[in-house]
Image: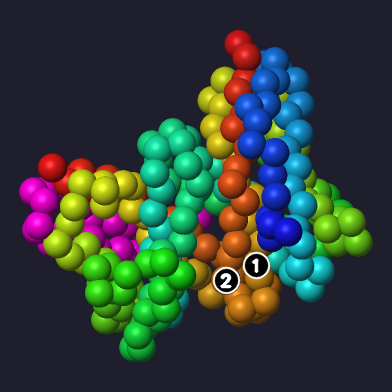
Amino acid sequence: GAVVSQHPSRVICKSGTSVKIECRSLDFQATTMFWYRQFPKKSLMLMATSNEGSKATYEQGVEKDKFLINHASLTLSTLTVTSAHPEDSSFYICSAIRLAGEVRGNEQFFGPGTRLTVL
Amino acid sequence: QKEVEQNSGPLSVPEGAIASLNCTYSDRVSQSFFWYRQYSGKSPELIMSIYSNGDKEDGRFTAQLNKASQYVSLLIRDSQPSDSATYLCAVRGRDDKIIFGKGTRLHILP
């Protein structure tokens, strides 16, 4: 399968600081990437859709000023958690769509995730 | 009505038996269907894609799609303890966004 990387894999920060998470598609170009959050034993929650060259689309209830998304190139999207608080502690996972020539063939691959702990 | 529904489980299956995971979806025009496996503390891993009615086999895995009944299933033959995980069903929606079910926890009993 296609490879999507995330950095860092784990981060611990103090309350009030900002944390940047990078998501890279290593062997394909991705015009669209997604950011998810997952709390322990809960399902994936889509936070936003990151589109290369345009503004991200946020899901209802997700604060765009708190979760800043930048999709600067076809292989890189970043999520910045601003002024992090303990309730932002979670597992953040990005994914990228690899185009397969036909719309129905597009497949979505996940990065390994970033575990954020805010003290 | 939830868009992609799965039984949360846990589904317990003896080692060596067939594990059967089911999923239903609400949008009749959906064309692309996926199964992901997620181990605890890890991100989801794509294991099967299916686009046409019928069966698609890959090793010990078989995905089955029935668009008329709006269900997709995953069969795991010769279940191994390493298959114990949460299995997520995913469907591509009208806006090209992939919608995930909440997942079924599978436990293979040694």
Report x, y in % for residue A72: 26, 81
Q: Is residue B55 visible?
A: yes
Q: Is residue A84 above or below residue A79?
A: above
Report whether A74 appears left or right of A87. Answer: right
Which residue corresponds to the image point at 75% horizontal and 20% vertical from the top-left?
Answer: B17
Q: Is residue A7 magenta?
A: yes
Is disc 1 on the same chain as disc 2? yes
Which residue corresponds to the image point at 11% horizontal and 51% vertical from the top-left?
Answer: A15
- Label 1 marks which chain's residue? B
Residue denoted by label 1: B92
**How far apart are the two marked residues, 2 and 1, measured between alpha carbons?**
6 Å
Whether pointer 2 and pointer 1 mark residues with C-beta atoms closer than 8 Å, the reply is: yes
Q: Is residue B74 visible?
A: no
**Most foreground residue, A6 or B94:** B94
Report x, y in % for residue A97: 49, 69
Mark closer to the chain start, 2 or 1: 1
Q: Which residues are magenta?
A: A1-28
User: Picture quarter containing residue B21?
Assistant: top right
Report whether B3 appears left or right of B38. Answer: right
Which residue corresponds to the image point at 81% horizontal and 53% vertical from the top-left?
Answer: B71
Q: Is residue B100 above or below residue B12?
A: below
Instruction: Locate the C terminus of chain A by quadrant.
Output: top left
- Picture disc at residue B97: 2
Report x, y in % for residue A118: 17, 46
Q: Is residue A35 above or below residue A50?
A: above
**Most foreground residue, B34 or A18:** A18
